[in-house]
Amino acid sequence: MMILAKLGLGVASSIVFASVYTFREGVIRVDVDEHRDGGSHVHFWVPAAAVPMAMHFVPKEHLREAASHASEFMPLVQIVTKELRRYPDTTFVDVEDGNDHVRVSTVGTKLQIDVVNPQENVHVAVPLTTVNDVAAQLAANAPGI
Amino acid sequence: MHARSLRFTGPALLSLATLLASPAIVFAQTSPTTSTTSSNSDRWLHVRVISTESKGETVRVNVPLEMAEKVLPAINKDRLHNGKVRFDDHEMNGVDVKALLDAVRTSKDGEYVTVQGNDSDVRVAKQGGYMFVHVTEKHSYNDKNGKPSEKSRVEVKIPMKVVDALFSAGKDELDIVAALRALSAHGGDTELVSVKSDENTVRVWLDSKNVSD
């Protein structure tokens, strides 16, 4: 009975630990709704902490290739994401053109991009820390470093 | 049995509490100098473009000047390097802009250029620490008052300190970051650029609000 209790406590603690760790960094949210007949509807939530972890499993050569293309912009991305964290709940760009609406904003510590038009609705929200972590990892894998 | 269970649950709950508190601890450690809320002293540059055409396109951009000051030096592309834009002498048609601005700066307030033409009026003036440039383009037909109808009106009002900062780099460079710093230091709400034409209305202004009106 006591062993079962210990086992249960261990499993519960592990689950709580994993949940807290996973959701501590927030969630990446992607919603895509195509309005045409048979259009796709994609809705997924990914724990942000999983992304930097997943990048450790990406083969080095692929990471180096991606980094070589993006290395020029990575320092900029790191600075922008670091600075954006100082401005929560702010709309930086808002474009309305007839039925098209594009907005780039921060919601809390997330970068949110919303594109709404008659063809599709796209909403992407990514924690700024995740973007920063990914940019740092790509910069670290850039050729010549 | 009950006492023995408590012996295990106590440390477990303590570990759980520590774990739950850890995000706050980590956050406090990683960002001690950055506030999550925008400071009241932040200066914001706003750009608003409203198209008067049928679809009514509207563009609103809100940029904190402090952020722009930090981000710009990180962009090194084409002519923009370290927050400075390089331009060629021949693009200025042989005009020594620095000498020209120096002359304007040391001169008293007044109107320097006034051109009244059939198709446009131009006015360049310095007044109260600001440099004004007004350009009015006219239609070929007259309005109901018998005056030439306005096609577009451009009004630029720039603090002289910002102009100075802009040209504070080398002879053939514009120091954008220095200009942004000068703008940040400039107190009060300021309307920098206003363009009104048949197609668009453009407004660029500076204030302490993080939203455009």
Image (tube, coloured by chain):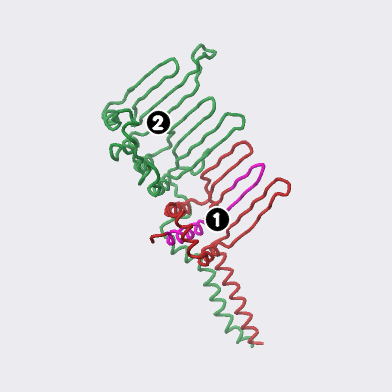
- In this view, the residue farthest toward the right is A37
Which quarter of the figure has residue B128?
A: top left
As helix, strand or loop, the secondary structure at mark 2 comes to strand
Give the amino acid type for the residue marked by disc 1 in the picture.
Val
Which quarter of the figure has residue A117?
A: top right
Nearer the observer, A10 or B79: B79
Please identify the quadrant where the N terminus of chain B is shown: bottom right
Which label was assigned to residue B204? none
Q: Of circles 2 and 1, which is in front?
A: 1
Tell me residue B138's x, y (percent).
Answer: 48, 18
As helix, strand or loop, the secondary structure at mark 1 comes to strand
Q: Residue at x 61, y 77 (%)?
A: A11
- In this structure image, what is the colour of chain A? red
Q: Residues within 10 Å of mark 2 (few under 14, many from 20)?
A: some
Nearer the observer, A89 or B82: B82
Marks 2 and 1, how far apart in space? 39 Å
Q: Is residue A117 magenta?
A: yes
Q: Residue at x 59, y 76 (%)?
A: A13
Tell me residue B14's x, y (percent).
Answer: 54, 76
Tell me residue A73's x, y (percent).
Answer: 44, 52
Location of residue B21 with respect to B90 vertically, above or below: below
Q: Residue at x 47, y 65 (%)?
A: B26
User: Mark 2 belongs to which subunit?
Assistant: B
Give the amino acid type for the residue marked by disc 2 in the picture.
Lys
Magenta segment, which residues?
A: A114-142
Q: Is residue A77 left or right of residue B198?
A: left
- In this structure image, what is the colour of chain B? green
Which label was assigned to residue B157? 2
Which label was assigned to residue A126? 1
Nearer the observer, B209 or B171: B171
